[in-house]
Image (cartoon, rainbow, N blue to C red):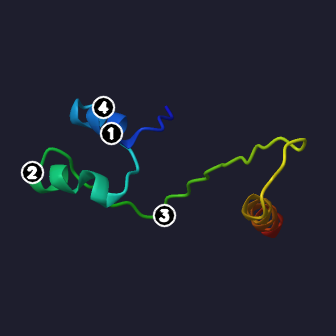
Amino acid sequence: MEIGSVGAIVNMLLRGFGVSFLPEFAVSKYLQTGELARLDTEDIDIELYSYLIYSRDRWLNPVMKEFIRIAGESQKER
């Protein structure tokens, strides 16, 4: 399941629902108290996908244009 809220994911983990990849700073308190545990893994292959969606008909400021250019270049490198 994909959830965009780190807080919601932490709440689900605290209730015993599955495992997740989270930044350590988001769960450090729960790791210290033992409410959550870190699982060390080896040889795990994970693919993440991201999308950039924008309207070609709308005005884009220079920073937005540069971001789109850089994102497009990084996609071509793959």
Q: Residues within 10 Å of mark 1 (few under 14, many from 20)?
A: few
Q: Quadrant of residue 57?
A: top right
The secondary element bearing badge 1 is classed as helix
Which circle marks residue 12 in the picture? 4
- Return the residue at label 1: 7
Residue 3 drawn at (x, y percent): 47, 34
Q: Which numbered disc flags the more N-terminal residue, 2 or 4?
A: 4
Which residue is at a point 35% across and 34% down the rendered structure image? 8
Residue with the mark numbered 3: 43
Tag nearer the camera, 4 or 1: 1
Task: Please report contact status of discs 1 and 3: CB closer than 8 Å, yes or no.
Answer: no
Horizontal relation, residue 45 to residue 38: left or right: right
Report the mark closest to the observer, 3 or 2: 2
Query: Looking at the picture, which amino acid does disc 1 mark?
Result: Gly
Image quadrant occupied by the C terminus: bottom right
Q: Amino acid at mark 3?
A: Asp
| Foreground pick, 68 / 51 | 68
The answer to whether 12 is drawn above or below residue 45 in the figure is above
Q: How many marks?
A: 4
